[in-house]
Image (spheres, grey):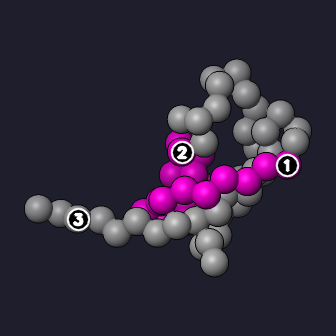
C-alpha cells in the first residue's frame, strides 16, 4: 500500500482578474496540482491565472 503525505499549502492566484488565495492539502507545491484543486472549486468558465504555491505557516 502506497501512502502519500499531504501538506497544507496556500495557493495565490487571480480569478477573473481579482487577486485571491485558498488553502489546500496538496502532495507537492506544483502549479499543476494547485490548478487542478482550483478547478474543482470554481466554475469551468472562470479564468484562473498567475498561480503561485507556497507552504502555509
What's the CA distance linking mark 3 and mark 2?
19 Å
Tag of residue 32: none
Which residue is label 3 attached to? 3
Q: Is mark 1 on a helix, strand or loop?
A: strand
How crowded pointer 1 is (Cα within 10 Å; few <14, some 14-19, many 20+) is rated as: few
Neighbour tally class for label 2: few under 14, some 14-19, many 20 plus, Cα within 10 Å:
some
| Residue wearing tag 1 | 19
Q: Considering depth in this image, is 19 or 52 the residue closer to the camera? A: 19
Contact (CB < 8 A) between labels 1 and 2? Answer: no
Q: In this view, does 6 lie to the left or right of 11?
A: left
In the picture, residue 6 is in which quadrant?
bottom left
Q: Is 21 colored magenta in this rendering?
A: yes
The magenta-colored residue range is: 19-37
Q: As displayed, is residue 57 above or below residue 5?
A: below
- At 79% from the left and 49% from the top, the residue drawn is 20
Q: Judge whether residue 43 can be spotted in this image.
A: yes
Residue 19 in the figure: left or right of residue 47: right
The spot of residue 50 in percent (x, y) is 78, 51
Q: Marks 3 and 1, how far apart in space? A: 34 Å
The reply to whether dot 3 and dot 2 touch (C-beta < 8 Å) is no
Residue to which mark 2 is pinned: 37
- State whether residue 32 appears in this view: no
Furthest-bottom residue in this view: 57
Residue 54, position as x, y percentages in the image: 64, 70
Q: Relative to 12, is 42 above or below? A: above
CA distance for labels 1 and 2: 17 Å
Q: List x then y, in percent, for residue 28.
A: 48, 65
Q: Residue at x 83, y 33 (%)?
A: 16
Amino acid at each position: 500500500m502506497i501512502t502519500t503525505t499531504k501538506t497544507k499549502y496556500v495557493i495565490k492566484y487571480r480569478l477573473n482578474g481579482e487577486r485571491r488565495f485558498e488553502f489546500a492539502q496538496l502532495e507537492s507545491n506544483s502549479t499543476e496540482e494547485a490548478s487542478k484543486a482550483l478547478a474543482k472549486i470554481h466554475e469551468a468558465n472562470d479564468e484562473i491565472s498567475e498561480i503561485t504555491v507556497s507552504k502555509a505557516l
